[in-house]
Image (tube, rainbow, N blue to C red):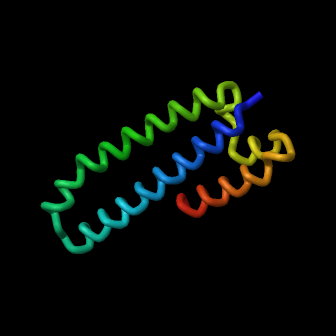
Amino acid sequence: MLDYPKIFAFLDEYIAHYKVFLQFEYQKLDMINKDDIEKLSDSLAREQALIMKTNALEKKRFKLLGDDAGKTFAELIETAPKWYQFRLTDKYNQLSEVVM
């Protein structure tokens, strides 16, 4: 059985990361719109760090979910015990809001 408390802690970290990444992307878009090539060039190191963190989080997700790592979020919610489904749905909505 999945360790749902660890999954919830992971999802909080995952959502927080994507909020930071989204903010960075907005800043990068602003640099592009302002044709600020110097700042854009300087931001590459930060972008690489964010990408590396994303990759690390994906590895952590695969390890945490084990055999269930290939399931969609909706499938995870559907197969979770009833008392965890509401919280998972809430996390799904939070992540969807950031990603969309």
Q: Position of residue 4 (x, y in %)?
A: 71, 38
Above or below, comparing residue 69 to residue 26 in the picture: above
Image point 74% across, 48% down: which residue? 74
Residue 86 in which image quadrant: bottom right
Image point 59% across, 63% down: which residue? 97
Above or below, comparing residue 54 to residue 87 in the picture: above
Q: Position of residue 88 (x, y in %)?
A: 72, 50
Question: Which of 29 and 6 lies nearest the eye of the viewer?
Answer: 6
Q: Position of residue 14 (x, y in %)?
A: 53, 47
Considering the image in quadrants, where does the C terminus appear? bottom right
Picture mark count: 0
Considering the image in quadrants, where does the N terminus appear? top right
Image point 70% across, 37% down: which residue? 71
Q: Is residue 27 left or right of residue 70?
A: left
Question: Which of 62 and 91 lies nearest the eye of the viewer?
Answer: 91
Question: Residue lying furthest left in this view?
Answer: 38
Q: Is residue 74 left or right of residue 22?
A: right
Q: Is residue 97 left or right of residue 68?
A: left
Residue 26 in which image quadrant: bottom left
Question: Residue lying furthest bottom in this view?
Answer: 34
Image point 59% across, 46% down: which residue? 11
